[in-house]
């Protein structure tokens, strides 16, 4: 289990390093080797995630249900919390991706016509609403726990 988690962390670090390399390189065209490397890292991450899910589900299914005992920390409980936090994290990432172009366009519009400030705030609020929807989903899922 530790090996799978370590391979996931290393593949994410490699993906981040490749992203930093691509952002800081003066060339705008990515080298030919980078696509294969990124796909390999993404494949390693996906296979490690599937391995953790498989091992975690086997541990959860092997446990006998006991309503009286206090909640123990297990892989299944950890995966439940990851599943609850995932909508908030992914929605926040999506909102950040949406807010970048909308914010820069809003600043350009405000520089040209300051009277459109209220309208641009509405567009920014709609993009930020994506993160709020993810937070609401996580709260609803946490209520089922």
Image (cartoon, rainbow, N blue to C red):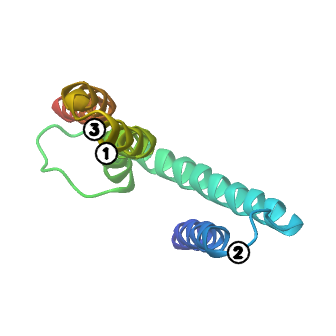
Find disc 3 in the rendering and name its residue.
65
Residue shown at 53% from the left, 70% from the top = 9
| Element at label 2 | loop
- Kindly tell me whether residue 136 is visible in this rendering: no
The answer to whether residue 8 is above or below residue 17 is: above
Q: Position of residue 35 (x, y in %)?
A: 80, 59
Q: Position of residue 42 (x, y in %)?
A: 68, 56
Which quadrant of the structure image shows residue 10? bottom right
* Crowd tier of the residue under label 1, counting other residues whose Cα lies within 10 Å: few below 14, some 14–19, many 20 or above: some
Rendered image: mark on residue 26: 2
Find disc 1 in the rendering and name its residue.
85
Query: CA–CA distance between discs 1 and 3?
Result: 24 Å
Q: Nearer the viewer, mark 2 or mark 1?
A: 2
- Kindly tell me whether residue 114 is visible in this rendering: yes
Q: Nearer the viewer, residue 105 or 109?
A: 109
Q: Nearer the viewer, residue 97 or 143?
A: 97
């Amino acid at each position: 289990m530790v090996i799978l988690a370590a391979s996931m962390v290393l593949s994410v670090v490699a993906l981040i390093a490749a992203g930093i390399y691509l952002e800081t390189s003066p060339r705008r065209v990515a080298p030919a080797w980078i696509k294969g490397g990124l796909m390999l890292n993404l494949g390693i991450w996906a296979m490690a995630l599937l391995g953790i899910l498989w091992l975690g589900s086997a541990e959860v299914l092997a446990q006998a249900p006991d309503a009286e005992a206090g909640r123990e920390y297990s892989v299944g409980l950890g995966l439940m919390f990851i599943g609850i936090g995932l909508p908030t994290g992914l929605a926040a990432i999506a909102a950040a991706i949406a807010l970048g172009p909308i914010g820069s366009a809003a600043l350009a519009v405000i520089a040209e016509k300051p009277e459109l400030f209220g309208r641009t705030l509405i567009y920014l609020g709609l993009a930020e609403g994506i993160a709020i929807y993810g937070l609401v989903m996580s709260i609803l899922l946490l209520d089922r726990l």
